[in-house]
Image (spheres, coloured by chain):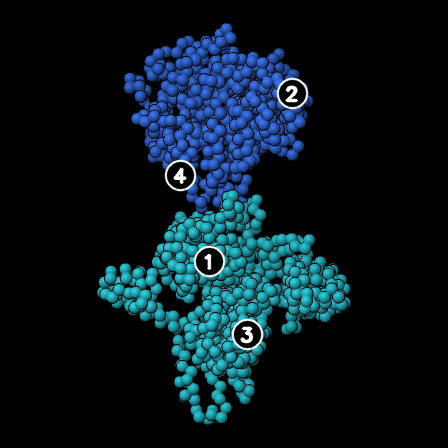
Chain colours: A cyan, B blue
Amino acid sequence: MVQLQVTNSPFNESQAELLNRLLPTLTESQQIWLGGYLSAMSLRGAGAATAAGEQPAPAAAAQGTLPAAAAAAPPLSREVTVLFGSQTGNCQRLAASLSRKLEEQGFKVTVSAMNAFKPNTLKKVENLLILVSTHGEGEPPDNARAFHEFLHSKRAPQLESLRFSVLALGDTSYEFFCQTGKDFDERLEQLGGQRLSPRIDCDLDYDEPVADWFEQVLGALNGPQNAPQLADQAVAAAEKADEPQSPYSRNHPFHAEVLENLNLNGRGSDRETRHLELSLAGSGLTFEPGDSLGVYPENHPQLVADIIAAAGWNPDETVPFNKKGEEGTLREALLRHYEITVLTKPLLEQAAKLSGAPGLQALLAPEAQQELKSYIQGRDLLDLITDFGPWNVPASSFVAILRKLPARLYSISSSYNANPEEVHFTVRAVRYESHGRDRYGVCSVHCAERVQPGDTLPVYIQSNPNFKLPANPDVPVIMIGPGTGVAPFRSFLEERGEQGAGGKTWLFYGDRHFVTDFLYQTDWQRMLKEGVLNKLDVAFSRDTEEKVYVQHRILEHSKELFAWLQEGAHMYVCGDEKHMAHDVHAALLTVIQEEAGLSPEGAAAYLENLQQEQRYQRDVY
Amino acid sequence: MANNESAVKPIGGPPSDVEHIKLESNYLRGALEATLQNPITGGLPEDDNRLLKFHGSYMQDDRDLRAERERSKLEPAFQFMLRVVAPGGVASAAQWLVMDKLAHQYGNGTLRLTTRQAFQMHGVLKWNLKKTIKTINDTLMTTLAACGDVNRNVMSSPNPYQSEVHSEVYEWARKLSDHLAPRTPAYHEIWLDGEKVVDSKADVEVEPIYGPVYLPRKFKIGLAVPPSNDVDVFSQDLGFIAILEDGKLAGFNVTVGGGMGMTHGDTNTYPQLGRVIGFARPEQIIEVAEKTVTIQRDYGNRSVRKNARFKYTIDRHGLEWFRGELHHRLGWELEAARAYHFDHNGDRYGWVKGYDGKWNLTLYIQSGRIQDQEGYLLMTGLREIAKIHTGDFRLTPNQNLIIGGVSSAKKRRIAELAKQYGLTDGAHHSALRRSALSCVALPTCGLAMAEAERYLPHLLDKLEPIIDKAGLRDEEIVIRMTGCPNGCARPALGEISFIGKSPGKYNMYLGAGFSGDRLNKLYKENIGEQEILETLEPMLHRYANERNSGEHFGDFVIRSGYVSAVTSGLNFHD
């Protein structure tokens, strides 16, 4: 048998070494089995990158088959590549919906996550539609990172023949609103691409702008002669297609009865984490471990009352709830329909038109960017109303400038199979003081203070295809979830317990204090006893003089963790994005570097590869 | 070592589960090393918890929070009680300061002086046990054998400065304690990283006195110096009553077979008084103690733990059998018991000058609990005193505290500090309150069926107006309360006692001897506060009006026919 080397094979040194050790030990039947297994695996990978299992025909060949009649004007290509970068699944779902629309109209569509798309085929793409969200400080989602990096590198090809359009999802309350979408839009233009239609940046309430973008994109692809028959309902259709068995969705939430609402923190804790159990009976809603629950909260009644009083409005005045013509009292509108706890630049710009207060104008001046940023930080509508009155406008005009109260997404912490017709979720109450006033997280404090068993909460299921247990129950699973990040892993483990799965499981958990903050402690203890959970490593940061976090536990178990990865373990990280996910990522790089004897770049490539293979999935926020 | 010629055989029956745990523990090691480190639970498995007791600690949990935490998917708030051995209740000022510091650093910020003159610290988390025990050992104290089926903290009358004999007796208490301490290296391995505070000689049995399964049950020794029976010598498994002749310690009368614990509803269990079996010279008592312990080791009931105490061994086989067995093992005989007289078992409060010219201040400590409260900074005051004190601290068997060995030069400063922090001899309290004793009970004790430490002060608040009205404010009446019948506050020796049955309900006992020489008797069963007050009020008024001169309450209730006198535990349930 040939000795594999870096020079005579596509493998790196450590891979070659492993294969050289393994291959001579295989029996003939093992070799045959492995050969078949590997080809099947690569086929499945390729299949995922195409719609309806169809390989995209090379662009040149497709053009060659076009009728001569099209000679006068260059024919519009009927092939479209749809790429999405999605963290929580929104862009992925919208991409699928758009693809169906396109196919209905006769387009040949290739739809793919950005990290499943081969960048060297980009040169051949003629119509490119990009749907991408933005995270944290203007960062791309995990499955968009590599493609984003490639496009911005020197290796990016010139794309003179490319027509493209970008749909960007984001949140105007973040400084780098829709930054990733903007990056792609700008870069594709730089590389010579031409816009099919302008980029649209969507705020949390994205239904309408998404429908607009679909319409514009389809119009441009069809050309001016045959105006598109575009469904305004594209988005709704997308969601229907996604959960065909239930009539309930983001736009039509199910009012689920609260069965249980308890505090997971013990007395004496400075934290409050609620565990809620809701009934899905009669809704037809189901979900898989890793999915999220969208919850429509209510604003704090005191804040609503204070805003109305500060503005001098009448709480019973009738105002619109939305642009669809629904209406009701002002109090009701501010409680359930409009966002009142976050200030955004667009909101202040609109408000400036309704108030003569010179201070507000000054804040919006181009040179006052820093002041604007620091004003927005930690303030809410009550501040705006008090600081820049008087507001000589009727409440009905004022509410029209407010954003719709968005649903909050929470990782589901139960398995549907283990608890049929129920959904559990975990939410930490957010309370803090800012600018001399107590502030409350809208949904978390609503759940903590004003939701009792017997009440209902409007909810929907948000599936997250990028945070899923391996299909094979025998594959080992490593879960890293400090704080409320542990929620989905309760769901994972309940599911594995239901399946009687054979794969090993390992959970890393951390919080502040062992005695009061060990979320779901008795559940883990039971799962350990039952063998559903095989290893649990914990880090409590405030119990010892030196703070310890999950990443320290990961480093302590470097050898074993790497061995699990080599055995094919899938690894999951859930929780805080800003600090935890970065620190854990760095710790994983260290583990791989040390245990595999790789360079920093080699370790990064190893982890990147795990991500590509869906073996390193994150749900971070 | 058993007396093969004896006609009496050890009791049969399969050994209890605890006997198995001990046997398999490899001299108290068990899996403690590993389970102490398990980071997923703040508790220990039951087997290791059993063994941990020998190391001076009990796993407990805050029972007030149990239901609430279960709902929150949290395990019980496991925490550990640590008991520190202090023979005769003596600790240096430096040791006091260490205990104070540990209580704040790792405990719940309080200390408790036990009814056996030991320190107790509550609320220590599993992760802090080792650090705490190590620090205690660094200050030359130990937790080893503070609990478990071994000889416990040896009690002795805590006021050595009142006579030379007291300090001599204390020295014997210390020697008994050392002699009967377990020898297993497990303690040092687990808590002190293998450091050995005492060299263990090679080629010697690991436990020459106890053997691999230790005793069937706990074993208690106390030394009394008449006329004070503050150690309740008749409640001890083995008691020594100092005999003074010409102002010198001639030796001790030996008592055997006392004990407090019983089980509600089981008349095969009962409190019992120790009985005097003879006299030994001072230098003989270590040998007497060792042989007595080995007899209990060989003959105690290892099948049923609630019948395993030494008192049942004695009552089963008879005093004569025991005397014979002891003489056989000793190879010599005890002399005939000598005359003695006790007249009380309480403490004498306030400043007293000792035989050596030094001063002692006995402070009243409610329920033995050292803590700072709003308006009463007891713990801080004692800490400030400890900082300048050159003498020692003495824990009394009544859970009070003596600032001992104060030089005339320091007396003024210490008196000032005591005044500044309101530390009190209890003179402003009724004599009833000053004579009260209670165990810890809820929320930490796993055995408690009802409140004790947290409730007795409230009951006294309601009793005091009654005794004031009856004119009994300065009358010492021994009153005791425990949350269960295991007897930590020696309830069978209270003139008035309450033993918890269920939350808010107690059995009421009356008629023990004022000097601890007679057991009390069940008077009313399962009664709440209202009935307690309604029962005691007329009784106390009658006592005030009808008592003979100098007659104690315990004697009065017998003479008046409320209860009959119980002079042996065998009649306790009659």
The chain that hosts pointer 2 is B
Mark 2 and mark 1 in contact? Answer it, CB < 8 Å: no
Mark 3 and mark 2 in contact? Answer it, CB < 8 Å: no
Residue A1's x, y, as percent?
Answer: 23, 65
Mark 3 and mark 4 in contact? Answer it, CB < 8 Å: no
- Which residue in the protein does label 3 denote? A186
The chain that hosts pointer 3 is A
Real-space Cα separation, disc 4 to disc 1, in angstroms: 34 Å
- Secondary structure at numbered mark 3: helix
Residue B162's x, y, as percent?
Answer: 55, 14
Say whether residue B138 is visible. Answer: yes
Tag in front: 3 or 4: 3
Residue A386's x, y, as percent?
Answer: 73, 60
Disc 4 marks a residue whose amino acid type is Glu
| Residue pictured at 46% horizontal, 57% vertical | A586
Real-space Cα separation, disc 3 to disc 1, in angstroms: 29 Å
- Which residue in the protein does label 1 denote? A585
Tell me if B334 is positioned left or right of A209 in this view.
left
Disc 3 marks a residue whose amino acid type is Glu
Tag in front: 3 or 1: 3
